[in-house]
Image (cartoon, helix red, strand yellow):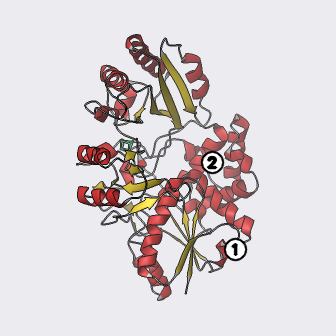
Amino acid sequence: MKRVGLLAFSSAASTMGLEIVSDAVRETFPEWDVRTVDETTAKESDYLLVSLYWWRDVYELPSFLDKIGLDPRSRRPIIIVGGMMAVNPRPLEGYYHYAVCGDGEDVVGPLLSALEADEDPYKIAGVWSQDNCQMAVANHLPAKAYTEIRKNTVTRIEIARGCKMGCRFCQLAGSKPYRENPFPVIRQLVLSSKTKTIALFAPDRASHSRFADIESMLSRYGKSNSGSDVRLTKLTGQSVASTVRFGVESFSAAGRKRIGKPIGDENLLRHLRYVSEDLRTPKGKNLTSATCYMIADLPGESDEDFNAFWGVLRRWDETLSGRFTLFLSVSSFAPSPHTPMERDAVNPYSTFNARYQNSRPHFRRLVIATRGALIGPGPRMCQMLAIRGDESCRRAVYHIATQERRLLRVTSPAAGRRVEAIVRASGSDPDLLHGEWPDDRPLPWSHVRRPWA
Ligand code: SF4
């Protein structure tokens, strides 16, 4: 009997991906021992499946291996990485044996079978190689409900994968075609779930072709939906919502057009007013808060963009009938692989945070609660190293992961310059990592084919 260890470093979402893949492994090898591992048990695995969900995980893997004294050059365990960051595993060269590019559930079983039979693993579509690689696309979404491991009070059901909206910055839209679970399957999963709270998850759940039916089915069966991400424009017309989260992303209409999420200021205002005045909670009350996702430091952004946004909010504030809290959830722009913006530049030394704070006006009834910020120069350079790095960056990644981890947090300009120096010392060009990537130069993932694109 072989042992398969499952390792995730960060969020529930990364655990979720591993759970889906582990089901596929159990189906292929029912007699194998497949379980979550940690620092004390990882070394006992024959295969170690690692989720690289976001950029910090690229640093967590070498750090973890270092900490437990596992030499990745040994063939036990065989380390297989997957997840969003595995679309470019090149900066981790030497810290894994195989990488799965795209959906893992139809790849990992055949990959393990090939390894067990001593066959060529690279013949399997979705296994990363530098010269011939195709993104894997699962034929079917899992017809399965997952109970959230940590709390055990929420059932997660994947209703769709990929996104129809195709925002230009969005890796989810760029690296996964849209697919959805059929309504009868979702209904069956909801009916058989033991928890009252259901998280129906999808990048944009309102895009599901039976979205309205799903919502009314949930309330008919007395379930509440904790999955709350939805497009703002889809909320208008909906009558009830318990929690509301939507992405406006850019501060100006021109910026929103540039990123492929076009909504003019007047329309934005109309939809915001709908949320505060017309939407009702399940108890029939007005909503008093909503979360709005914004991206910091989009290319071409200026102070004018802030002014345009505050202008819209000021007009909203004037007509609010009661106090309303808008949580602005700010994350940093990253030129993600397989998106139309993958060659765009970021400015690690941007003064976004100060300019944002200084421009923020006071409102009458509207309360702005900002969550998150633009990550500072140190983390931003580390992020770009993880996203755009190639084999020449592996030493820099290892050094930061094991010797100067503070650079993943410290936001001073000096920290950014220190990362640049480390990258330069490893033989790579920091300007290339954060600057505009030349049109005539392939990106580290340019050879990866996307069969649907
Ligand atoms: S940002 Fe949201 S709406 Fe846009 S493509 Fe991505 S998941 Fe879809």
Residue picked out by circle 1: 71
Q: Quadrant of the C terminus?
A: bottom left
Give the quarter the ligand 1 occupies. Answer: top left
Q: Secondary structure at mark 2?
A: helix
Checking the image for residue 40, the label placed there is none
Q: On screen, 304 above or below 338? A: above
Name the amino acid, label 1. Asp
Judge by depth and name the residue closer to the eye, 34 or 156.
156
The image position of residue 364, as x and y in percent, is: 49, 11
What crowding class fits label 1: few (fewer than 14 Cα within 10 Å), some (14-19), or many (20 or more)?
Answer: some
- Distance, label 2 to label 1, CA atoms, is 24 Å
Q: Please name the residue shown 69% across and 56% down the image.
A: 401
Q: On screen, 31 above or below 277? A: below
Left or right placement of residue 411 versus residue 263 in this view: right
Checking the image for residue 382, the label placed there is 2
Q: Secondary structure at mark 1?
A: loop
The image position of residue 308, as x and y in percent, is: 42, 18
